[in-house]
Amino acid sequence: MARIENGRQSADTTSIRTISSSRIDDESSLGSDSEINGFTSDRQTDKYGFIGGAQQHSQASAQDVPPEVLRQREVKWLDMLNHWDKWMIKRFDKVRLRCQKGVPPALRGRAWLYLSGGKVKKEQNQGKFQELDSQPGDPKWVDVIEKDLHRQFPFHEMFVSRGGHGQQDLFRVLKAYTLYRPEEGYCQAQAPIAAVLLMHMPAEDAFWGLVQICEKYLPGYYSPGLEAIQLDGEILYALLRRVSPLAFRHLEKHKIDPILYMTEWFMCAFSRTLPWASVLRVWDMFLCDGVKIILRVGLVLLKCMLGTREKLKACQGQYETMELLRAIEPRYMQEGYLVREILEVPVTARDVEREHHTQLKRWRKNRGELNFKPPPRMHGARLVMLAEPPRRQDLQQNPTIVLEVPPPTSQLKKGKEEKKSKKKRSSMKKSQPIMEVPNPYPLSIDPPPPPPPTEPPAPPPVRVETAEAVPQTETNSTHQQQEPPTVLPPAKESLLQRSTQSLCSTDQDTYL
């Protein structure tokens, strides 16, 4: 039985509520959104946050990466994010390869923001989102947005509760975009795009990511008239002729226009079609290489479902064909299989642009000029960055949560002791070795001085001073006449008198 919530009858409550007796108010701040909406702790979510539904994680639809490989990829991505401009300009092929392998879940939100150019856009428009968020918004778009909130991923714990934090942030992002681009307003397909971004980043970052997707990657998709999506449908149809001629002839035979089956695929970037593990891998490549990835996914699904004669026998008409495309076999959407097939499709950005010009000429010939002229489309993250070169400060990583917790006193003492020991070590390294000087007054207990490394210089000439000043001639004669002095027995020496040198020795002149 459906339950009345906030004055509206919920049509989807019977499918997602497991406990009908729950009487918790949806506006309560107690517990998580899943608890508020009737889910208790015994109902477990998968690793992506889904409580149920077709997009819930399963071993059959996803491939798990070993933890050691995941840690290695995280280290590589952290290095890329710290030097983003250099990697994008000089080693973009390596960035593309790592996006094809899959962005680590812990860094996916940050990587998406950098790939899309939302990080640069945010830094160059500081305070813009807060300004838009504070405005009431156009009542026409506000009412439509409020009606669409509960339809976005109702099985995800972030959006399962009416009025929960997920729906509140989704409303803020969509309302801010209608104020940022009032000429476009709001399109229902923008809601799942914004919801996917909100699962990985805060509201402000999700807003600038949505802006970049709508303006750079899929320009004109959400404008009135949906002319850009119709044009890309014709591009998909023309590329299908080359990739799978059998599927192309079948669709042409039954006159099935691309707009009938590819609108939700392209406008929601397959976020409501594929299993969630496959959605994330597709988005990793889409934000790196642009719309050609979306076209490749569409070509793979059409080829798998309509590319063989056995498959075509089961759909003899337009209705059967449309039912087949609405219920794609899970094996074709499995993460590993789908990614391999996407990478093997021979469609490049140049092929997309060439076909775009061809279809645009045909459109103008049959229907006239486009009513809404979108900005030029950017095929990938590298072209987005080159179109608006960032400043160095725009790419600096600012932590969203900063904790300032004083360390305990024991850690402070340890830190001070470590700093002191480091200073002593550095001073010992910097100080030059001290030359050892022999002690001129050694004691008996002192060890003998080490021999000098080199021969000492020649001693200066001996200088003998007499008590009386005598002329030179007289001193010479007196020295010749004097007898050699008698050797007296040495007196008893003290410890201080045993020095071999004196202040006025003949071997070393020392003048006081």
Image (cartoon, rainbow, N blue to C red):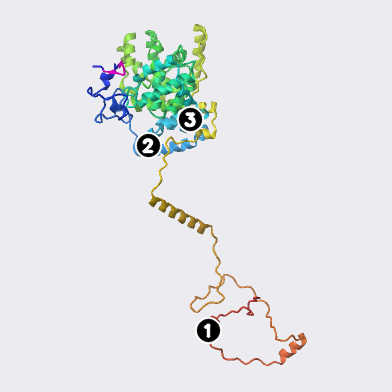
Taking the magenta stretch, the answer to whether it contains residue 17 is no
Which amino acid lies under the numbered mark 3 shown in the image of this protein?
Lys
Q: Nearer the viewer, residue 476 or 68?
A: 476
Q: Which disc is residue 70 wearing? A: 2
How far apart are the alpha carbons under marks 2 and 3?
24 Å
Dot 2 or dot 3, earlier in sequence: 2
Which amino acid lies under the numbered mark 2 shown in the image of this protein?
Leu
Q: Which disc is residue 494 wearing? A: 1
Dot 2 or dot 1, earlier in sequence: 2
Provide the secondary structure element on which disc 2 rests: helix
Q: Nearer the viewer, mark 1 or mark 3?
A: 1
Taking the magenta stretch, the answer to whether it contains residue 5 is yes
| Residue carrying label 3 | 119
> Would residue 391 be visible to someone looking at this image?
yes
Where residue 214 appears, as percent x and y from the top left, is 46, 21
Q: Count residues near mark 1 (Cα–Cα under 10 Å), then give few for <14, some for 14-19, many for 20+.
A: few
Marks 2 and 1 in Cβ contact (< 8 Å): no
Q: Magenta stretch? A: 3-8
- The vertical placement of 264 against 317, above or below, is below
Dot 1 or dot 3, earlier in sequence: 3
Q: Nearer the viewer, mark 2 or mark 1?
A: 1
Provide the secondary structure element on which disc 3 rests: helix
> Which residue of the protein is positioned furthest toward the left in this rendering?
21
- The vertical placement of 55 against 403, above or below, is above
Which amino acid lies under the numbered mark 1 shown in the image of this protein?
Ser
Q: Residue at x 41, y 53 (%)?
A: 413
Q: Residue at x 60, y 79 (%)?
A: 502
Classify residue 295 by image quadrant.
top left
How far apart are the alpha carbons under marks 1 and 3?
86 Å
